[in-house]
Image: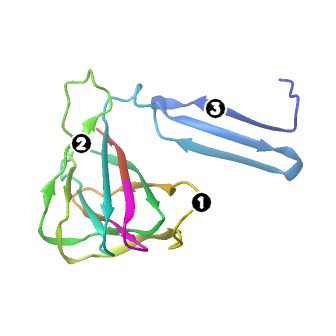
Amino acid sequence: MQFDSLKFKKTLKGPNGHIFQIDWDLPQGRCDCNELVSSPVVEPNYFTLSYQSTNNVHLPQEILFKTPVTPSLTNIYIIFEVYSDPGSRVILYENSTVIGEGYPMTAYNTDRNNPLTAPESQLFLSPIVSEYGTIIYDKTQGSSIIPKTTGDIGDNYRFILKRDTNYIFQTTPLVNKTDISTNIVWYEVK
């Protein structure tokens, strides 16, 4: 293999359709190998949910993600993205106790030809939470400066979730009138 540069990236497909990206930087003595989520075209059990809101007050937007008890489900790989304008605090809680699930949210299979249309995991908007549980992710993104001259501030976060567990995705705006967009993509491994 001949290289034109001492820096390059290569994307490889591994077992079970998993995609890996290798990033070499030989002058810096660095080689990173990152597993990217399997392609939705390759794996048929990908689901997605998107929700947008404009919060006129400093109230958090909360989504309950309930993982199933199903023994045949071995893992739930999840990526969630939160974008906000101008800024927000994003927290993911695990083992949350809810006394009201809230409003059911509809998720979609990313393989539109697949007859499996509903995921085993369930999502609800605005749950009534009695105890939030353990914080497994906490990040403030953006700022409270208005007007903002850049685009939306956002990031994505990846986890393998436990079965039979309640998770709360909480996004709290840093100022009034904050636009929040939440995208959740997950893969249920059977």
Q: Marks 1 and 3, how far apart in space?
A: 34 Å
Residue at 37% over, 72% down? 176
Q: Marks 2 and 1, how far apart in space?
A: 33 Å
Disc 3 target residue: 11
- The three-letter code of the residue at mark 1 reads Thr
- The three-letter code of the residue at mark 2 reads Ala
Instruction: For the residues labelled 2 and 1, say whether their Cβ atoms are less than 8 Å apart.
Output: no
Disc 1 target residue: 149
Q: Measuring from the top left, give residue 153's x and y in whole percent.
A: 52, 59
Magenta-drawn stretch contains 171: yes
Colour style of the rendered protein structure = rainbow
> Magenta segment range?
170-181
Q: Measuring from the top left, give residue 45's x and y in whole percent.
A: 30, 34
Magenta-drawn stretch contains 120: no
Point out the tag, 1 or 3, that comes first from the N-terminus: 3
Disc sitting over residue 178 in the figure: none
Q: Is residue 3 left or right of residue 107?
A: right
Q: Measuring from the top left, give residue 18's x and y in whole percent.
A: 49, 34
Query: On the rendered image, what quadrant is the C terminus found in?
Result: top left
- The three-letter code of the residue at mark 3 reads Thr
Instruction: For the residues labelled 3 and 2, say whether their Cβ atoms are less than 8 Å apart.
Output: no
How many neighbours does mark 3 have within 10 angstroms: few (below 14), some (14-19), or many (20 or more)? some
Q: Marks 3 and 2, how far apart in space?
A: 29 Å
Disc sitting over residue 107 in the figure: 2
Instruction: For the residues labelled 1 and 3, say whether their Cβ atoms are less than 8 Å apart.
Output: no
Between circles 2 and 1, the one closer to the viewer is 1
